[in-house]
Image (cartoon, rainbow, N blue to C red):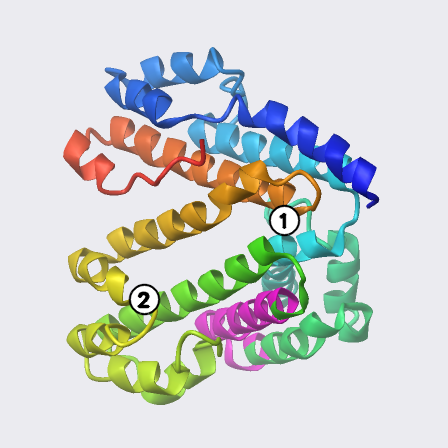
Amino acid sequence: MAEDKFIYAVARVRTKELSLLNAQAVEQLMACKSYEECLKFLAERSWNTGAEGGAAGMLASEREKTLDFISDIAGKQPDFNVLLYKNDFHNLKAAIKQVCTQAETPGIFFSHGTVSTDIIMKAVKEHDFSMLPEQMRAAGQKAYETLLHTHDGQLCDVILDRAALDAVYSAGKKSCNEVIKQYAELTVAESDIRIAVRSAKTGKKRDFLERALAPCDTLDVKQLAGAATSGIDEICAYLAATPYDSAVPALKKSLAAFECWCDNVLIERIRPQKYNSFTVAPIAAYLLARENEINMVRIILSGKLNNLSDTSVRERLRETYV
């Protein structure tokens, strides 16, 4: 993408940023008395509240709209692949389970991956994983064989989830884009910590942890695995000596509070890209900001539907990008 096209694309992003929910708008949404009033508020801001499937359909539609926009202005920029790998590996997981169980489930595939779902399904059905990109081949083959012979869906998920994290991290390390680098590092570290906490709560063994945790620069996964086998307090003690020391109070509170902390850190790190007009970074930052916004709307709508207290909902709300 030439510099003049960056300027044009970023100018279009700047226009889109004007419609992002700021802190005041989030407060107005929180102040709505009911789920229906929330939908009216969002409809006034051009959200697709008429989508099929209720709130889930609306949020999926908004994600689709955002990805269509990014595709339109950025084309096939390699830096964006890292943001789409989760779709690829979700689709691979879905294809493997569909083929192994011989049960077709409509609507299980995500759009906007880097690999078409037709190719993924063909690779799985023909047991020819060489059709897939290098980062998906070995994991796809192993996950398929594991599910076919052991019927262990969780182990299949672990294999592909780890491969997805490795793919994200590898792409982030290779990128010259600071937003992509930070996204990859924080995504992998957050996932590792979440896996460690859930494993500690469910009593998972060390061999499971070493299989599931993905290496990254800011965490020693062997130390994290060892801490997880001893409990949450040991995980917190280990994190206190890492760049994630400020996450410990949130983690002690709840896993949801920790995930909120991670999202806030990412938003704080990408916010300076609003003032950059000559690289792909502001476009990537907008995509991440939009995903953050959609998650906040999901949290608020869920709170209204389930009659949760405002205090409970606010604990899960993220920082806004604008």
The main secondary structure of the magenta stretch is helix
Residue 121 position, x and y percent, is 74, 59
Disc 2 crowd rating (10 Å Cα; few below 14, some 14-19, many 20+) is: some
The local secondary structure at tag 1 comes to: loop
Q: In which quadrant of the rendered view does residue 51 lie? A: top right
Question: Is 174 on the left or on the right of 290, as rendered?
Answer: right
**Observer-nearest residue: 295 or 262?**
262
Q: Are marks 1 and 2 in contact (CB under 8 Å)?
A: no
Type of amino acid under label 2: Tyr
Name the residue rendered at 18%, 59% in the picture. Answer: 249
Q: How many marks?
A: 2
Q: Is residue 126 above or below residue 64?
A: below
- State whether residue 90 appears in this view: no
The local secondary structure at tag 2 comes to: loop
Name the residue rendered at 18%, 30% in the picture. Answer: 310
Distance in Å between CA atoms under marks 1 and 2: 34 Å
Type of amino acid under label 1: Phe
Q: Is residue 211 above or below residue 156?
A: below
Name the residue rendered at 47%, 14% in the picture. Answer: 43
Q: Which residues are magenta?
A: 147-172
Question: Is 71 on the left or on the right of 192, as rendered?
Answer: right
Which residue has dot 1 on it? 109
Residue 58 position, x and y percent, is 50, 27
Question: Is 43 on the left or on the right of 14, as rendered?
Answer: left
Disc assigned to residue 244: 2
Q: Mark 1 or 2 closer to N-term?
A: 1
